[in-house]
Amino acid sequence: MSGLRVAVPKGAIFDDALSALEGAGLPADVVRENGRRLVYSAAGTEFIVSRPSDVPVFVEYGAADVGIVGKDVLEEHAFNVVELSDLGTGRCRMILAAPKERAEDVRLAIGHAEVVRVATKFPDTARRYFERMGRQAEVIELHGSIELAPLVGLAECIVDLTATGTTLRENHLVVLDEISTSTARFICNRGAYRLRHREISALADAMQGSGEPVG
Amino acid sequence: MLPPESTRLLDAQARIRERFRLFGFREVLTPALEYSEVIEENGLRDASYKLFDQDNQMLLLRPEMTTPIARVVAQRLAGNPGPRKLSYVLPAYRRASVGRGQSAELYQAGVEVVGSASPMEDAATIALLVDVLMSLGLEAPSDFAVVLGQSAFYSSYLRHVVPGAATPVTAALAAKDLVAVDALANGLPAEAAAGVRGIPRLVGPADDGAILEEAERFVVGEEARAGLENLKEILRHLEAHGALGAVILDLGLTGRHEYYTGAVYEAYASGLGFTIANGGRYDNLLRRFGKEMPATGFAIYLERLLSVLPGRGSRPLLVLVGGDVGGVEAAADLRENGVPVLHLSEDLQPRAAAEYARSIDAPWISYPAKGGVKLATADPPGEFAIMDARSVAKAVLA
């Protein structure tokens, strides 16, 4: 059928991404069958599963024609890909948070233009956020368990994604500010967008809601 | 860059030069260093290596070739009758890719037609690009396509219909963020929104006419009309060039450099996510150098092009081993017959000679012998046979 290669992200938006692809008539259910494989193919379509932050890399280089990824990943790094549509799923917020008992201190420190230490998985997003406010922050890049950083004094606050806020509450963190909201996006390689426009735009339209299968 | 990679690059450059010359383009050389003021586009300035001369003037290593050629034409060739059809095969330098392990030196080949506003010249340069890519063994549209747009069409639509939103919409489109374009369109009156949303999505083969028909719906004002007519004129001539089948229209394509004013295009190869060439019309660039001269042209990114070219076959080369004065004479005799010969003065055993030949991708080894040479294949090492120079030529050049 399509002959496209589709990059699907592991993690929070994995299920929504597969449902959207299935809703558009792609045989994405093969990806659910066996969690260990890296490449799946069915009816001429190939699926690759990767870390969310790697999805736009595969797409930018043309190793995948299209992909699904959260806007948060696209905002963190300027990938040269075409952003075709907003799938509306996987909604989450990029927030600035601090421990409850020190939240007011951190707010004051930022208000007084003191240099605060921020732990985050999204260093560029964090830096841009503070720059936009005319503030300077020391950004510490971590790769997991961001909530740990303020608990042990590595940082005074964090910039992180949250969907429900449960992890924040469990670690006694409160939201100081909402930086942006993010939803899943359907992205496309800029060469494939032109060379295979008909099938890719049909897929984008089908995913955006009509649910009609792609021909 | 070492053989065989360098050989492939030089072969491609030689072929490209041949095609450029066949279309009457004359090759220029410009200095790698340019005064900083020559380049005004922010993106290009950021990507440039900068240095200072003894008078503290800032210099740039040229990040591309179009602007240096515009400068040369404006300063040195403006008195000549136009148009000037110039070509180049030179490296440019960009620091954007440093840190990703990519080379800071990019080999480019391209042409510029300076001093003509005719859409026929846009069509002719696009056709030349298609000719070059096909002469290197690529097929259209299976291996590559040239994506053609008109940067004046969408921008004049925006200026006419939604002047206030033109800047953010253009910025969103330049970032290839169609979601942001849609979001901006949602805040506009329905009729305007249809064009803001619709024009960037007009993408499809140039030879089926459907895209242009659709585009007609969004023609507002003289400028947009002129832009569309210009595009039609280019397509009419591309058809005469026999290049229309290689072209895809994309009315959302705006061109990567701010100096583009009209037709813009990018060439894509299937399976490679990046452009292998890009070009377009830049009618205001020479104003920067005090001349009003419209111009159009393209640049091919040779390293990217090489990565999609077919064929890595070895070339005829024979390693002739030792033989003292007799070896020198045998080598001369072979070269006389057109055989490329690498003569090693040291006497190597056949096994060592074959290993040496394989290390330089030479398919043949030989030793001087009575009445000619002893010849054998190097990979896999074959049996030696005695042949005269003419028979060797037949075997090696076959």
Image: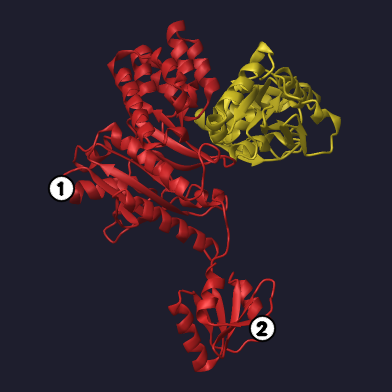
Chain colours: A yellow, B red
Location of the C terminus of chain A (image quadrant): top right
| Left or right: B366 as drawn, with respect to B117 | right
Is B336 on the left or on the right of A85, as rendered?
left
Kind of element beneath mark 1: loop
Q: Is residue A113 visible?
A: no
In the displayed structure, A38 sits above or below A170; it is below
Q: Residue at x 52, y 78 (%)?
A: B342
Q: Residues within 10 Å of mark 1 (few under 14, many from 20)?
A: few
Against B256, residue A170 (above or below) is above
Which of these two is toward me, A123 or A44? A44
The residue at the point 58 percent across, 72 percent down is B362
Give the residue number, with chain letter if any, for mark 2.
B350
Q: Amino acid at mark 1?
A: Asn
Q: Amino acid at mark 2?
A: Pro
- In the image, B110 versus B362, the foreground residue is B362
The residue labelled by disc 1 is: B80
> Residue A105 in the image: x percent, y percent?
65, 28
Residue drawn at x 42%, y 47% is: B132
Left or right: residue B301 versus residue B77 is: right
Asked if B226 appears above or below B51 in the picture, the reply is: above
Q: Position of residue A43 (x, y in %)?
A: 75, 29
Nearer to us of marks 2 and 1 is: 2
Please determine if labels 2 and 1 lie on a single subunit. Answer: yes
